[in-house]
Every structure is written in structure tokens, then in C-alpha cells.
Amino acid sequence: MADTTHPLSQNAANNETGFVRAIGLFDGTMIVVGSMIGSGIFIVAADISRQTGSAGGLILTWVLTGMLTISAALSYGELAALFPHAGGQYIYLREAYSPLWGFLYGWTLFLVIQTGTIAAVAVGFARYLGVLFPSISPSVWIVHPIALSSRYAISLSIQQLVGVLMILFLTFLNTLGVRLGKLIQNIFTSAKTLSLVGLIFLGIFVGRNAGAMVENFGHFWTIRNAQPIDPGASFLRSFLPTVTAGGGVFGLIVAFGVAQVGSLFSADAWNNIGFTAAEVKNPKRDVALSMAFGTVIVITLYCLANLAYLCTLPIVQIQTAPDDRVATAALNAIFGPAGAMIMAVAIVISTFGCNNGLILAGARVSYAMAKDGLFFKSTGTLNKKGVPGSALFYQGIWITVLILLRTRRVDAGGIVTYGNLYSDLLNYVVFAALLFYVLTTIGIFVLRVRRADAERPYRAFGYPFVPALYVIAAISIMVVLLLYQTQTAGIGMLIVLIGAPVYLFWSWWSRRAARVGTTQ
């Protein structure tokens, strides 16, 4: 049941005094666009094209992602207008179901979804800065890897250091007030949007390759080099086949379901503007509009970017792009070796702006949780600039830890290689993030019944059909992931479920602190 006695339900304004309402519709749209566009659009096309096996499959994957993302954003607008408060989706889940569900989302967001994404983007920033300045290397160590166990280690390379410094710098800037944070966001989002538009223009009009276009568009649905997709667990292999995109209808469904992992993750973070609703000038209108405008802009750019890749590179070259850097391969085809430098500059700008938006928004969820007694008390306070400075600090510390921690693997020859822990964690929580999106969308139906008389300045577009279609489509993808990416989906759910005892602890601690305060 929803906790109808919660203070926010009674008088939200009293709990959100001190915030500076400085985010307008343009600013909110820039937060959505800037948070969504990171480095994924420049990379994931390689993996998607291997899974779907065709030019048509690549484009259709992004069209499906666009339909899902835009329908979700149009549906979320109702919740954003109904609960225009700091915390966004955390608040929606809490009010639709119970504080437990809100906490499970906030816990997973802080532990992995938001912070893991920021860590990945920070290291991506450092990696592409290393193209411009080769001394920023992942193999030049300040602290050599120290084994923590047979599978994990901790280290500090020059590349990691640059990523950490980026996090600390942006965290500090965001403690200086939301006006500075939105200014940085507006500048870098505008710059990276123009960079992506430039890539699209170059690919479609300047670098178009007649041979690539004949191969890709003349054989639009011809499946080539589609990788086999195995069931996600050994016990499933007795009744589920290994499939490819060319293996009939079932193979296509599985291939497109698995391919959605990369595209949906690249199109994620559209909901972040809801986290900052207490700082939006007209939250009952502009949060919903920012979600809608931002997602439409980004999805349009993403589809056009993939069209540009297909105009420049044959599908086989997209599938085999070195290190999956499809955008770099496209610019190399146009400009030669200088293309790598141009792409590096574009991605450095893109990742910097992306992380500013994610850092700005993410701390507001920790703030909302702390106001409910479900996180460190200090994170529920605002600094003199009207922003949750302590929440930003805790978030920055955890991101730094995620950057420093490494996975450790030893091959048959005894050679040790190191990966990034946050990469594994992000793979695990894609399923969990989709689960929370589904639950939140279902929450629209729940609240239409439980709070039928509540003021709704905006109602979900196409209700009940658009939200219902989103739920059905998303659940279908989740089923595919459970069957064919069982381990990652299962570990993701485990991360979420671990939050349940943590919730019980925080609830107990909050009640205990309240009793102690009453008796003093």
C-alpha cells in the first residue's frame, strides 16, 4: 500500500524550502539531452549490428528503442506533474506502492545505475582524452594493481586519475549552485549536439560511400555474420536453442531483445530531470515537457547517426570496427587518420556534458531518501547555495571507489588482465533498471485508482494504450534477457533484493533516532 501518511503527501512544500527554482524549459531539455548523450551512440552500433546481422536490423533496433523511450517519457509526464518534488522516480514508486519500492530504486540508483554510469563516462572521457594526449594511459601506473582477491583488485593509473579528477571537479562545481550547474550543462549539451549533427551531416552528405550504400540499402534486410546467442544458463539449454537473427521469428525476437540492452542503455537517463523537479521554475508543466522534447531530440539524432554510419561504412565494417568505435571508423573513412582526433574531441565534449547532468541530478535522489530517514542524515540538507552538497559529496566518493576497483582475470597461461568493476555492474543492472521503469509505468494505473481525485496538470499521452504497450514491450524484453542473459539479469535482481534488508535497517535506525530525539 502507498504510505499516505508520509509528510510529502501532506505538505511537500515544507520539506523542499531552500531549493533555488532556476531551471526553465530550455534548461530542463538540455539536462535530458545532455544526460542521455554520452559515448554509447558512438560505440554500441557495432554490437547491435553483430546481434541483428543487417542494416535494417540496426536501424529497426533504434526505432524500437525510440518508441519505447518516447512512450515511457510521455507516460512519466503524468507522474512528474503529480509529484513535482526532488527525487523524481524514487517519489513516484514510493507513492504508488510503498517506501520499500522507492528505496529499492534509490538504493540501486546510488549503488550502480547512476554512479556506475558516471564512472563509465568518466573513464570514457579519460580514454578519449588519451587520444589527444597519449600520456593519459591505462597502463601507466601511479599505484600498480593490488589484488584484493582472486577476482578483484584496486589500482590507480593515469587514466583512472583523470577520470577521478573529472568527477571531483564537476562535483565541486555543482556544489556552487544549480545556476552554475545548468550553465555548464547548456554550454556542453549545445556543443555536443552540434558535434553529433556535424557527424550526421558528414556521414550522409560528405562521406557517403556508393559501395557501402549499395551493400547496406540494396540488401537492407540481408543477414550477415549474425552472432549466435546462447541461452543464459546451462539448465535452459535443454529446452531453449542457440539462435541467430536469421533463425526464424524466434531468433529475430531474441536478437532484437538482446540488442535493446545497448540501445536502451545509450538512451537512458531521460528521467533525470524528474530528480531536479524542486528546482524547476514551473515543475507541473516543464518537467513533463522537458522529458518529451529531450527524448524526441535524442532519439531523432540517434537514428540519423546510425543512418550516417550506414551511408559511410558497409555493415561488415560496422560489425568489425576496431574496439567497436564505429563513429571513429566513419570519420576515418572521410578524413583519414585525422578522423580519430576529430572524434576524440567530440566524445570528450560529450562525456563531460553528460557527467555534469548525471552528477547534478543523481544527488537529488539521495537527498529525497535522506528526508525520509532512509539515507545518511546529512545528505538531506542543502548548502548555502541551495543544493544538496553532502549528497553530492557522498555520490562523488562512491563514484571514485567504483573507478578505482578493478576486476581481475587470470587466463590459462597465467597472464593477468584487469577490467572495470563498474562495467560488470552496469551489465547486471540493465534488467533491474528496466524493471523499475515497468513498475513506475504501472504506477500510473495504480495511482489513477488510489488517487483518482488528485490534480493532474498533465495526463499520460494515449492513456491507457501507450503506457500499456510500453509495459508489454518492456516485459517482453525482460523475458528475453532472463532466458538469454540469465546470469547478468539474475545478479542485477540480487543487487536490488539486497536493498530489502538495508531498507529494514535504515527504517529501524530512523525510528530509533526519532524515539531518542523525542525523549531528550
Image (spheres, grey):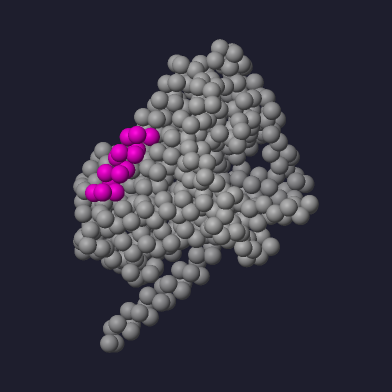
**Magenta-colored stretch includes residue 227:** no
Q: Position of residue 263 (x, y in %)?
A: 51, 37
Residue 133 vs residue 272: left or right? Answer: right
Chief secondary structure of the magenta span?
A: helix
The image quadrant where one finds the N terminus is bottom left
Q: Residue at x 46, y 44 (%)?
A: 125
Q: Quadrant of residue 93?
A: bottom left
Q: Residue at x 33, y 56 (%)?
A: 172
What range is drawn magenta here?
179-192
Q: Position of residue 3 (x, y in %)?
A: 35, 65
Residue 71 vs residue 241: left or right? Answer: left
Q: Residue at x 41, y 73 (%)?
A: 507
Q: Residue at x 41, y 30 (%)?
A: 196
Q: Quadrant of residue 219?
A: top right
Q: Is residue 400 above or below residue 464?
A: below
Q: Is residue 217 above or below residue 328?
A: above
The image quadrant where one finds the C terminus is bottom left
Which residue occupies the extreme front position in the image?
135
In front here: 420 or 298? 420
**Magenta-colored stretch includes residue 180:** yes
